[in-house]
Image (cartoon, helix red, strand yellow):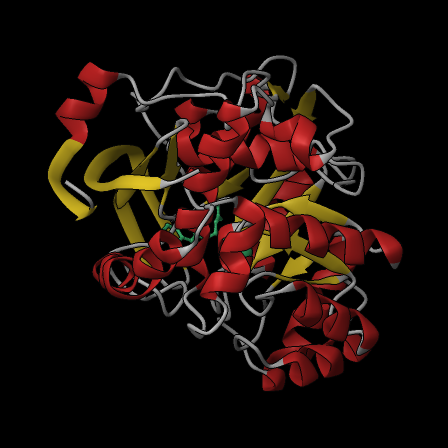
Amino acid sequence: MKLERVELLHVAVPLVTPFRTSFGVMTSKDTFLLHVVTDEAEGWSEFAADPEPLYCSEFVAGAEIVLRDFLLPRAAALPRLTTAALAPALAKIKGHELAKAALETAVLDAELRAHDMPLATFLGAVRDRVPAGVSVGIRDSVPALLDEVEGYLAEGYLRIKLKIEPGWDVEPVRAVRERFGDGLPLQVDANTAYNLADAEHLRMLDEFGLLLIEEPLEENNLHAHALLQQRIATPVCLDESLHSARDTASAIAMDACRVVNVKPARVGGYLEARRVHDVAAAHGVPAWCGGMLETGIGRAPNLALAALPGFTLPGDTSASSRYFAEDVTEPFVLRDGHLTVPASPGIGVRPLPETLRRFTTGRRVLFGG
Ligand code: NPQ
Ligand code: MG
């Protein structure tokens, strides 16, 4: 393929309710979509992070500059643009995995469409639907949390993840266990809110039979996570600390994680995400597909990935309605606790033009005319 034009569309999509984590409160998904035009086909993707670097070091305005000044010139200089050639061409640019993932995914969408192949087929999916979990934000009170969890269970979600932070951990977990029973698949996510001195406190979660505790400690501190794992029975799962398949292999070798959250954006795209999956599977370590409150453009390819055989736990791949009253694509709906894996070529979805227009707050041509 030959790169002809790349356009970036800023979008602001309101959330149905504010989503609070240990790093902040979100009321709307503010990000950009990338639209790549080649001589053979067009592709779309979504940048996963926020306007502020609170979850990770990358952010919307920074990614735009990285794409325009460093990534797109290298993609355009390739004699033949293919997804396989892209990551090596971008490798000299350090870091910026989320920006790289946005570019790679749009190119992959275009390339697969040119070959009439769904992403799920390309990745090696073995399922046509995937079990859906849901991530539940920090609330002002335990009764409000229980009401929210009850609503999700009524909708059919198969696994609950509670966001936790110091002051909101043992009490909400105990309340959810008491109300919904020991059989409920339940896990927690601290988004780096604790430190090793909290180990004895976190050990109080052991009695609740959680599937895992996600990223309890500082990002990239594999050693501290390994020390924590020695002191608690709940399996440690890493999210923010894993930026590549190599990180994943190191973390598993150190016993810094016994479960892996795979977010394609965080590891630079779907090709590396499949390698992360392969590393986890080779070690018999359970994996699941994470989420970043994506619109349908980011949600669709995550569902294709989540259909790989090593994803043995339900992911944060929720229905569109969990986050948005109106999505920029046809909404993904929960059926029998599952979401259907897109079966059309590429990522399998397109923005709805009229809806996209309403959510678009700005456009920039980053490459071409
Ligand atoms: C997590 N996701 O697993 C993240 C946290 C998160 C579904 O809990 C913009 C940028 C929005 C980063 C929303 C879930 C985000 C974001 C949530 C990260 O840690
Ligand atoms: Mg997480």
Between 42 and 151, the residue placed more toward the observer is 42
Between 79 and 177, the residue placed more toward the observer is 79
* Coordinates of residue 85 in the picture (x, y in percent): 54, 53
Regarding residue 132, the answer to whether it shows in the image is no
Residue sitting at 22 percent across and 24 percent down? 356
* Coordinates of residue 357 in the picture (x, y in percent): 15, 24
Residue sitting at 60 percent across and 66 percent down? 242
Between 209 and 331, the residue placed more toward the observer is 331
Q: Does residue 46 sit above or below 329 in this rendering?
A: below
Q: Does residue 246 appear left or right of residue 81 in this picture? A: right
Residue sitting at 51 percent across and 44 percent down? 82
The residue at the far left in this view is 362
Between 296 and 76, the residue placed more toward the observer is 76
Q: Does residue 83 appear left or right of residue 359 in this picture? A: right
Q: Does residue 168 appear left or right of residue 196 in this picture? A: left
Regarding residue 246, the answer to whether it shows in the image is yes
Q: Does residue 154 sit above or below 298 in this rendering?
A: above
> Residue 28 falls in which quadrant of the image?
top left
**Quarter occupied by the C terminus:** top left
Residue sitting at 80 percent across and 78 percent down? 254
The residue at the far front in this view is 79
Q: Does residue 281 appear left or right of residue 195 in this picture? A: right
* Coordinates of residue 359 in the picture (x, y in percent): 17, 29
Q: Does residue 215 sit above or below 227 in this rendering?
A: above
> Residue 49 falls in which quadrant of the image?
bottom left
* Coordinates of residue 316 in the picture (x, y in percent): 56, 40
